[in-house]
Image: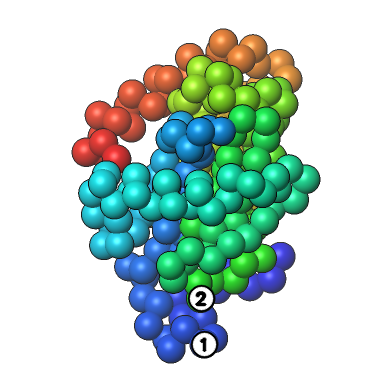
Amino acid sequence: GGGRQRGALPGGGGTMDALVPVVKAVLILDADGNRLSSKFYAKDEFPSSAEQTTFEQKLFRKTKHTSARSDADIIMLDHNVAVFRSTGDCRFYLVGSAMENELILTAVLDGLYESLQTLLRGQMDRRTLLDNLEIVILAIDELVDGGMILETDPNAIVSRVTMRGVDGAQEVPITELTIGQALASAKEQFIKSMNRTDGF
């Protein structure tokens, strides 16, 4: 709903050109702050893994005592805003510039969170996420591309992730797809996409 306007935001001084990502990073950390999955889109701000890891650690230290289990929580860090949710032993973060609309960022995070809950059958623990990392990465790719928000509807994300490997066959609902099939197709897609790009 609502106009999905990109680019200049009110109060942003109109400097938001297409190259400035709306989402700077999507991160999943475990209960000790170790990275399970991370996608940084703001390459100028986080050019190397050193900056990325430093940022993850700062973010983790600032949020580790907040539970954020039922709803997303929001914190400011440097000149960024981070929305996060946690489950058992994992934390999901979405980072944007402090000028971004927190409601939109929260909707994006919820879209990822809810789609993973469906894809992983409610098993949102560290072990399951690591075992299904391809699915996690595919879901993030359907959510955000190069920092631009593609989709926030969990159902749409779920069906795209499950369809990515079915190659034009009729749509199979996730409930009829065994997690093994979903994984095999995700793995195949993942390998294809890894060969296509220069990694992360």
| Image location of residue 100, percent across then percent down | 53, 71
Question: Helix or strand or loop: what does disc 1 sit on?
Answer: loop
Crowding at mark 2 (Cα within 10 Å: few <14, some 14-19, many 20+): some
Could you say which is closer to the camera, residue 114 or residue 193? 114
Q: Name the residue under label 2.
A: 99
Q: Which of marks 1 and 2 is nearer the N terminus?
A: 1
Question: Helix or strand or loop: what does disc 2 sit on?
Answer: loop
Residue drawn at x 38%, y 52% as measured from the top left:
55
Please say if 171 is above or below 68: above
Residue drawn at x 58%, y 20% as measured from the top left:
128
Check residue 51 in the rendering and tell me which mark sits there, or answer none. none
Which quadrant of the figure has residue 67? Answer: top right
Crowding at mark 1 (Cα within 10 Å: few <14, some 14-19, many 20+): few
- C-alpha span from label 1 to label 2: 8 Å
Left/right placement of residue 97 relative to residue 44 reads: right
Circles 1 and 2 in contact, beta carbons < 8 Å: yes
Could you say which is closer to the camera, residue 36 or residue 112? 36
Residue drawn at x 34%, y 59% as measured from the top left:
42
Q: Name the residue under label 1.
A: 11
